[in-house]
Amino acid sequence: MDYLHEGLIRFGFSEETTPVLEEDLRKYINELMLFNSAYDLVGAKTSDEIIIKHILDSLSAYKTIRKLADEKISEGLTDICIADIGSGGGLPGIPLAICMRDIKFRLIERMSKRCLFLENCSAVLGLSNITVDNIELERVSQESIDIAVFRAFRPLEYKMTKKLIRVLKHGGYLAAYKAKESKITEEMDQIKQIIPEYEKIPLEVPFLNDNGEYERNLVVVKRQ
């Protein structure tokens, strides 16, 4: 089974687009495999594990994030910025940037060695729409980001959520990759005084939650 090819097809990418995306995504997977042990990038040992648990999981929110970006463009904004907070090995930022080359991405990561990896990947893949910021979330400029995404970051607790909301422009979006609905409800109940409303969007990850064993959701919050 060619999990990457089949996964992209199931996401709805066209037969014309898929080969180009596949080529770049496989280059990225090779970089992850090459540097994983030295940089502790992902919790997967085989390329198939990386494809299913990391690449396809990252791209499961592509349509929603693309829609949010297009909404901003329709409002007349011409310089959209999507930030991957706590990017680590570049997930979900790099897979999304490969599929959205018309949008600027900031990979925000506090660990210098991981930033070196991200910069190397950006060069190898020719991703001119990516910048890497070796910086902590606390030092990111206020109201500088249109859409903030994160995956395998910290829980949405009070202090962290305030910091995340602070970096968003007014009308900007926070898109958090999360697991079980019950856990999301528990987290969001703790911070309802600062986020009274949010949208939970179920994510379908090919080959990961086909049998219902895994549950993946995207929590979307708009800064008013």
Image (tube, grey):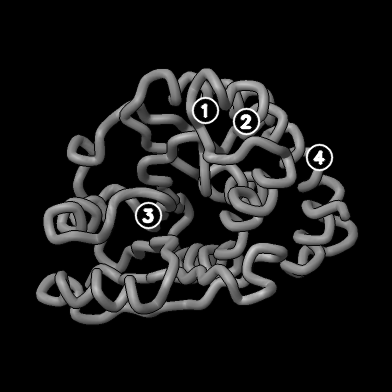
Pointer 3 local density, CA inside 10 Å: few below 14, some 14–19, many at least 20 = many
Callouts 4 and 2 close, C-beta under 8 Å: no
Residue type indicated by callout 1: Leu
Residue behind mark 4: 23
Sequence order check, earlier mark of 2 and 3:
2
Residue 159, image x and y in percent?
12, 54
Secondary structure of residue under mark 3: strand
Residue type indicated by callout 3: Ala
Sequence order check, earlier mark of 4 and 1:
4
Distance from disc 2 to disc 3, alpha carbons, whole Å, reads: 23 Å
Residue 137, image x and y in percent?
25, 40
Sequence order check, earlier mark of 3 and 4:
4
Residue 66 makes an appearance in the image: yes
Residue behind mark 1: 118
Pointer 1 local density, CA inside 10 Å: few below 14, some 14–19, many at least 20 = many
Residue behind mark 2: 32
Callouts 2 and 3 close, C-beta under 8 Å: no
Residue behind mark 3: 148
Distance from disc 3 to disc 4, alpha carbons, whole Å, reads: 26 Å
